[in-house]
Image: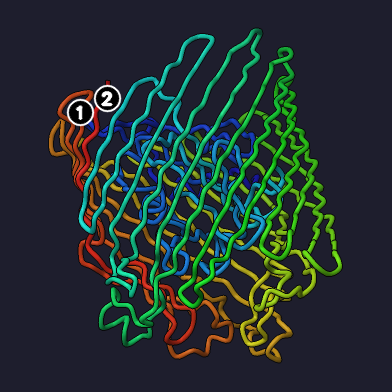
Amino acid sequence: MTIKNILAAILVLVIQIPNTANALIGPIIISLKPTNIASNYFNEVDTSAPFSSEIYTESDINNSNSSNIYDFLTQNTSLNVAPANGNRFTQKIAARGYGLTDGYQNIVITLNGIRLNNIDTSAQELNVIDINNIEKIEIIKGSGSVIYGDSAMAGAIHIYTKKNTETQLLTAVGNYGLEQSAMSFGLNQEKFGLNLSLDNLKHGGYSVMDPSGNKDKGEQTNKNIGIVFNIYNGTELQLGYSRNNLNNRYPNYLTYSQFKENPAQNSTGRKYTFREAKSTTSSFKVKSQLNDSLLLSFHTSKIIKDSQNTYYYSSSPTKNDYDYRSNDLLMTYENGNLKIDSGITTFNGSRKGSSDTTTKENTGLFTQFQYNQNDTIFTAGVRNESVDYAYKPNSGSHKSGSHHLNAFDIGFNTNLNYSTSVFSNINLAFQAPLIDRFFKWDGSFNGFMNPSKSRTINVGLNHLTDKTKTKATFFRSNLTDEMYYYSDGYKNTNLDKTHKYGLELQNKYIVNPKWSTNVNYAYTVAKIDEENEASGAYNGKTLPMTSKHNVSASAIYSINDNANLMLTQKYRSKAFSEEDFANSKSQRQKTYSSTNINFSYRANDNLEFKFDIENLFKNSYGTWLRDDVIYPSNSTRNIKAELSYKF
């Protein structure tokens, strides 16, 4: 008996298999249909993918009534998300046991194909994305290194915005001085398309005033324009431009007793950290169907950013200017059951500070094969990437370094029957060091570091019926030279050997035409196998900021054809604090728990009202750096009312 038949026999014993694969709930569109995946240039449905995925459509995002993209990812996905040192406008995102300390450095995030990762250790900034303008979010776990290269060890997150065909106005208000407004306009014709959007967000702050009379308040404005020309014979031109402005303050650290007493207090008596950031992104893409088998595309983008931080311990601002330029050339060949994607990608990034300029340049070549045979899809791909660094101080000698790195992925997905498929893939990935890793705590040059490498195996199952959609994945990753900050030695270095494993479960279930549920659970273990620092005291210890249990659960109730109610519960178990690699600190990262209630009422096809209560029970959460160094991030019950109108 073949392995395929054995698996089918086991599954028949534990799963009752109905006949259909799609269902709708009343006025809430809950689609159980497979969803096409654009990531990895796969262009097949998610239940046929040879890798683990979480796909969230426009209806999923709308049903959540989330205030922003960070809230959506926190409350509805398997990702771990938390404000970066208390900064709610720039948050860290982690997956697959890489931890909230540095996990965001091990996952690639793109917006409409443009890479958002930075060349230093600052987190990707998703605050530039208006959640009301998102069409789809694709989370690819344990894969993506062949296509996206550097940093795709945990996987990749891909965000796609809408091509609007209407005009929409939105306004929202809430407690703690929340004010939000957004406008979008779309025009899509046969040969021409135009999309405009503008959004603004303000909040008045959650903590007490600092000595300058300011709370931890903030404001951001995002402007976007996109133009599409359909020239002839399948040739399309896309132009994009966006401008983003942000200024905000975020609170200082607290001791444990201060955090328990009142997370909104200002313990240091100093001013809050103040950040100003501006960025512009311009892009051009052309794709042409040269013949029935060959598609050629070229995508170039440029991001110019400047960021200025005035920290609570200093009166002088730290200023950096960034210049990122990317070029992607892709050729897709299809003939019968065979598809080949090959490409060249380049990324040139520079950061100019007050005393030096540091650059990181990536050049990658990749080829990926996809072959369909009966009910089975096979994929295999390989990538070679060179990474070059240059450090140019205003005075002193220049330094340079380079790495030559490889990635591969091989996998398959096969249908056991009309409702169940299994998949598996093996992935080799890497992360080249970010430029901050080369510097000591005082800003002096420390030296170049080894890149991190991972080998991951995923084994998973998809099951689809008329009532439920289920995904399950088991994974194991073995790593060498995972990067971290060795606080006792005040330096960046590498963990010699580490490993991670876990189980991920997703289930959408339609109880009846009024009720549906959605559960997302991740069980993760992350361990240090060998590390020569601290005389081996880290060996066998759990990696900091890695929660063993991560649960997102929601229930949607359709009150009538116009009104819906959604209850969401997010839970993340405790972990060791950011610097506690020896697992010996007396204080640990506390659990995260938040209960949200969302109500929506659609008066007609154009007018909609939403009401949201976030963190209903006012649970407090902060980020533990070490004992008595806690950055508060959430302790309030937040209420918001929103009104939108489509023309």
Local packing at callout 2 (Cα closer than 10 Å; few below 14, some 14-19, many 20+) is: some
Viewer can see residue 414: no
Q: Amino acid at mark 2?
A: Lys
Pick the residue in front: 505 or 5. 505
Tell me how many marks there are.
Answer: 2
Determine whether 239 is above or below 109 in the image.
Answer: above
Determine whether 537 is above or below 483 in the image.
Answer: below
Give left or right: position of 642 versus 34: left
Determine whether 76 is above or below 35 in the image.
Answer: below
Place of residue 415 in the rendered image (x, y in percent of width and height, measured from the top left):
56, 37
The N terminus lies in quadrant: top right
Pick the residue in front: 121 or 551. 121
Q: Amino acid at mark 1?
A: Leu
For mark 2, what is the residue?
A: 646
Local packing at callout 1 (Cα closer than 10 Å; few below 14, some 14-19, many 20+) is: some
Viewer can see residue 231: yes
| Residue at position x 62%, y 34% in the image | 42
Q: Which mark is residue 61?
A: none
| Residue at position x 52%, y 38% in the image | 46
Labelled pair 1, 2 in contact (Cβ < 8 Å)? yes
Which colour scheme appears in the figure?
rainbow
Place of residue 439 in the rendered image (x, y in percent of width and height, measured from the top left):
71, 72
| Residue at position x 67%, y 46% in the image | 324
Disc 1 to disc 2, C-alpha distance: 7 Å
Give left or right: position of 396 versus 513: right
For mark 1, what is the residue?
A: 607
Give left or right: position of 308 versus 614: right
Occupied quadrant, residue 396: bottom right
| Residue at position x 41%, y 78% in the image | 253
